[in-house]
Image: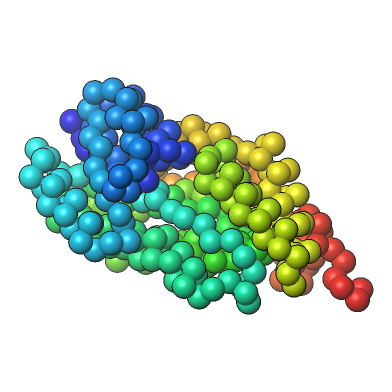
Amino acid sequence: MRNVLITGATSGIGLATAKAMNQAGWHVIGTGLPGEDASALAAIGENITVLEMDISNRQSVYAAQAELQAMLDGHLHAVVNNAGITAAGAILELPVDELRRQFEVNVFGHVQVLQAMQTLLSNDARIVNVSSMMGGVSLPALGAYSMSKHALEALTDVLRIELANTNIQVVSVQMGAVATPLTNTIAERMEELAASEGGYAWLYKAMVKVLHQQSNGATKPEKVAKAIVHAVTSSKPKTRYIVGGAARGLMFMRQFSPDVIGDGILRHSLGLYPKTGD
């Protein structure tokens, strides 16, 4: 039986992916933070292993690696880097410690996992980085998250080239708003910031409206999981999967529109148009 490690598998996209990979006949090792409720993950059924791991903590990651090395009969055939957090706030007032924490989990944590697990990877392993539309389209008040996902896209590109002389393939999965607990947490945090009446309250109030609008048409995590399963199991996976029409449209706009025009389109779509003084 083939083995897949999925980080952040106790809820949302990670849990949906664990269910889908298990249904596809894989042994799923799903991770959650130490002390986190993993009952939904454990309840999926047979061939599910729950593993405690904080990807931002080196000791925790290497302890998990040692546990896997002793446990597995064979190799890891896939790693799905899904765990992540979101720091909300305008860049010029976001505490640098929060920005640093954003990168510790969303970027350095994934690198740490891959460095620790590389000795367990099979010759034909898959590395799937669960990214975001914001890896190509930066959104205001979510700049820290956007920056981390841009970095994750760069990590994907670099790994794809550095592992080109192997049979290990590296894939990115990008999507827009997804109906997960993390999305709800972001909206709640933005509402708190909007109520503060600080210098960026106007921005947060606009983004609260955007987030509520997005939640109405948010992609189901099962749809993202379907793309991840294809990325893991296909003999010829894409280098990037874009899930959801809105994400595809915004990324196309950013790729092919001049920055000034793209900025205007984005501001208008977010209700941030016109500029003050226009």
User: Who's the residue at 38% across and 66% down the image?
Assistant: 104
Q: In this rendering, would 136 be left or right of 125?
A: right
- Can you see residue 169? no
Q: Is residue 54 above or below residue 224?
A: below
Q: Quadrant of residue 138?
A: bottom right
Q: Residue at x 12, y 40 (%)?
A: 72
- Residue 130, position as x, y percentages in the image: 44, 50
x and y, in percent, of residue 126 in the image: 30, 47
Residue found at x 18% / y 58%: 62
Q: Looking at the picture, how far across and down is residue 189, in whole percent?
A: 61, 54
Disc tally is: 0
Work out which residue is located at the far front of the displayed protein and give it: 196
Please tell me whether residue 1 is drawn above or below residue 178 in the rendered image.
above
Residue found at x 23% / y 35% = 49
Nearer the observer, 248 or 108: 108
Query: Residue 50 location, x and y as percent?
Result: 25, 37
> In front here: 27 or 45?
45
Quarter location, residue 42: top left
Decide which of 45, 197 is in the foreground and name it: 197
**From where the camera sits, is residue 62 visible?**
yes
197 to the left or right of 75: right
Seen in the image, is 15 located left or right of residue 269?
A: left
**251 above or below 178?**
below
**Looking at the picture, does residue 258 appear above or below residue 47?**
below
Question: Which quadrant of the rendered structure holds the C terminus?
Answer: bottom right
Image quarter for residue 260? bottom right
Q: Nearer the viewer, residue 161 or 65?
A: 65
